[in-house]
Each structure stands twice: as structure tokens, then as C-alpha cells.
Image: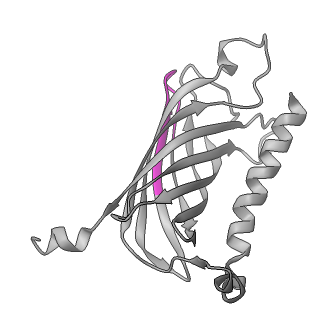
Amino acid sequence: MKDWQGVCKGMVTGMVLGGFIALPAQAQAEDAGIRVIQGGPAYFNMGLGAFNAAGVSPGVGKNNATLPEMDLEYQSGAKLFGIGSVYGIVANTDGGFMGYTGFYTDIAWHHWILTPVLAMGGYHQGRGKQLYGTFQFRLELSLDYQFANQSRFGLKIAHISNAFIKKQDPGEDEILLNYSMPISWGEHQQGG
């Protein structure tokens, strides 16, 4: 199972970093209908899924179990070169949770939106999985369908890891169904 966990870490890391590295190639991608979204509304995202969904070793006890989880996230509408800020919290049913902040970008292809996220924050184990340290990194990649009203629905994969700043880095992988609701702060401030 350790090999599967390494493969998952590598895939998520590669996809997230690939999303950010691909930004300079925007002009070529636009010819194929792919574009980086430069602005737009802020989003409030809600995800339901499984904490520690991959890389679970059988027989190692309750602290390595796959658990139901919820992810709440705010993505700013303001972006610089297509990169915005993200703030969120993910919590599982064994009292484990992580508050995080970082950066994201949206890459659009017709009605499909690919969103890589690179974040860091603090993890509290609760009765859940030991991740060896409070300070953790969070990588996400979501693929959502955007409806005419700009709301989005799709699938998100995520990974929490200490990136080997500690001697042990078991990490954990998540899979979630994700719903994103656009928020228009400007209209609320103007009373509209």
C-alpha cells in the first residue's frame, strides 16, 4: 500500500504544479479553447467525501480508517495573473480538522473548470489519522461543470502531507463531491 500512496502523492503534486506551470502557455492553450480565468465572482465551495480515501493499510487500527468528511472553502474573486487566494477548513467525523490558506487558479475549457490549489495550514488529529505535525501542506485538484448561473458541481481530489519536514510523512488522500456557489460581494455592499 505504501507504493499506492506514493503514486497518489506524485499524481496530485504533478497535477497541481502542472496547473500553475501551465499559466505561461496561455496563448497557445486559448487556440484549443482552454483559458485561465482572470477574474469573476468569489466562490463558496462545499465538499462531502472521504478522508484518508487511498493508501489505507488493513489491520493498523482505527487511526488509519477512511472517514466521512466535509470541506468548506472560500475562493477570492480578485486574481493577479489568474491566481487568487483560498481559505478553507476540512473536518472528518473523528474530530480531525485542518484550517488552510493558499493559492488557486481556474482553467476553463468550455463549461469545464479545472482548479488546482496549493495551500498550507494547521492540522488537529482529533481521534483520526496521525500526520506527524501540526503544520501541513494541502494540494487539491477539482474538475467541475459550470452551469449558466456560474455555479459549479464536480469532483475534487486532495492530499494533506507534511512534505517530509518531519521524519514520518504518512499523508492522507481525499475524494469529494464538490458544489461551488458564486458570491457577489459588490452587490451586497451596494444594497442590491
Measuring 69% from the left and 68% from the top, which residue is drawn there?
Answer: 19
Q: Is residue 129 above or below residue 81?
A: above
Q: Is residue 120 above or below residue 169?
A: below
Give whichever of 47, 34 is nearer the camera.
34
Measuring 59% from the left and 79% from the top, which residue is drawn there?
Answer: 35
Residue 150 image-quadrant placement: bottom left
Q: Is residue 45 above or below residue 174?
A: below
Measuring 52% from the left and 21% from the top, which residue is drawn there?
Answer: 94
Query: Farthest residue in the right direction?
Result: 3
Magenta stretch, main secondary structure, is strand
Give whichever of 11, 99 is nearer the camera.
11
Residue 147 image-quadrant placement: bottom left
82 in the magenta segment: no
What percent of the width, then of the height, locates residue 191? 9, 71
Give whichever of 95, 34 is nearer the camera.
34
Measuring 72% from the left and 87% from the top, which residue is drawn there?
Answer: 28
Q: Is residue 182 left or right of residue 190?
A: right
Q: What's the magenta region?
A: 87-98
